[in-house]
Amino acid sequence: MSKKTPETKAPLAKKAAPAKPTNRASERRQERQQEQRRQRFLIGGGVMLAIALSVLLAVVASRAPVEAPIPTDLTARYDGLPVSRTERGYLRLGNPDGTVRVSAFISLSESDSRTFHRTVFPALLERVRSGEITFSYVLYDASQRMEASNSAGATRAAWCANEQNRLFAYVDAAYGWFDQYGVQGAYASNRLRSGAENLGLDMGLFDDCLRSNRPQEQITRAQQDAGGRDSTVVAPTVFVNDVPVAGEDLLLAANDAINRALELRSGGQPTAEPTSDATVSPDDVTAEPTAEPTTEPTAEPTAEPTTEPTAEPTVEPTVAPTATADS
């Protein structure tokens, strides 16, 4: 007989210890926090991407060509005029030798300066062509009178055109945009740039100027010149030989001041003629009255009283006593 082997009982599996509720809750809390961080990251990244895209679109839109028409008569208007710069960096039209200096403070942001450019400036430009005056524009913005959006940007662009001797042409074009596109659209950044390109400016130099601080330095200089007078200049204001012109009719007042300055200049140059006339004429006048009173009055009274009265008393009394003595 075979012996029965005793049955061996399989060891009972140990029951898994239940997870501590506190550990599971902590894990779930950590998972939720990680999910929240992922969501915040995605949201933040999306916002940053949207901002970057909007900036990029704005840059592209600001540089996209738009209509910026240029007056057709600009070439003929300034053709042949000498161009130079004042000590303050302002572009100057006309021959500076022997002429009257005329300057005008204007602003691209308000309508009075626009009216001045269209009604007074053409007449002054004719006097530039005649060689009587030189003319300069001083661009600045009086903040209390701004009427156009981005007028500061337009002023900066105009000063950059000034560096390429095209300030006057740029002012012509800018006032035209003001009329055509209104206060909101006239001086949009892309229009200012398209206008410079349409004027034939070197766009590399123009963009470099806009990125630099040079336009702001020129604007600050113009502001100083405007505020450095007896009273703050209100555009438009005309100066003739650095003296402000006053009057409701600026063209009439400016022409009068120019004419007076030309008369003073012409009177001061030919010094030989006035000096000769003034010297000879007084001497001639003195010679005539001196000759007449000296000759006539002295001859008559001296001859008559000296001869007649002396003869009568001297002869008669002397003869009578002598005859008596003889008798």
Image: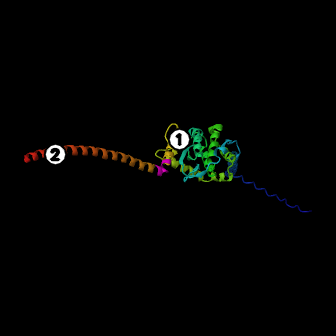
* Kind of residue at disc 1: Asn
Specify few, some or many for label 1: CA neighbours under 10 Å numbering under 14, 14-19, or 20 or more.
some
- Let me know if residue 35 appears in the view: no
Residue drawn 24% across the image and 43% down it: 304
CA gap, disc 2 and disc 1: 85 Å
Closer to us: 88 or 12: 88
The overriding secondary structure of the stretch rendered in magenta is helix
Q: Which residues are magenta?
A: 266-273
Q: Find residue 208 and report its horizontal and vertical position in percent.
A: 65, 53
Farthest front residue in view: 327
* Kind of residue at disc 2: Val
Q: Is residue 282 magenta?
A: no
Residue drawn 10% across the image and 46% down it: 323
Residue drawn 63% across the image and 52% down it: 209
The residue indicated by pointer 1 is 255
Closer to us: 197 or 36: 197
Taking 251 as reference, is 216 above or below it? below
Quadrant assignment for the N terminus: bottom right
Marks 2 and 1, the one that precedes in the sequence: 1
In this rendering, the label closer to the viewer, 2 or 1: 2
Closer to us: 320 or 64: 320
Secondary structure, mark 2, is: helix
Q: Is residue 267 magenta?
A: yes
Secondary structure, mark 1, is: helix
The residue indicated by pointer 2 is 315
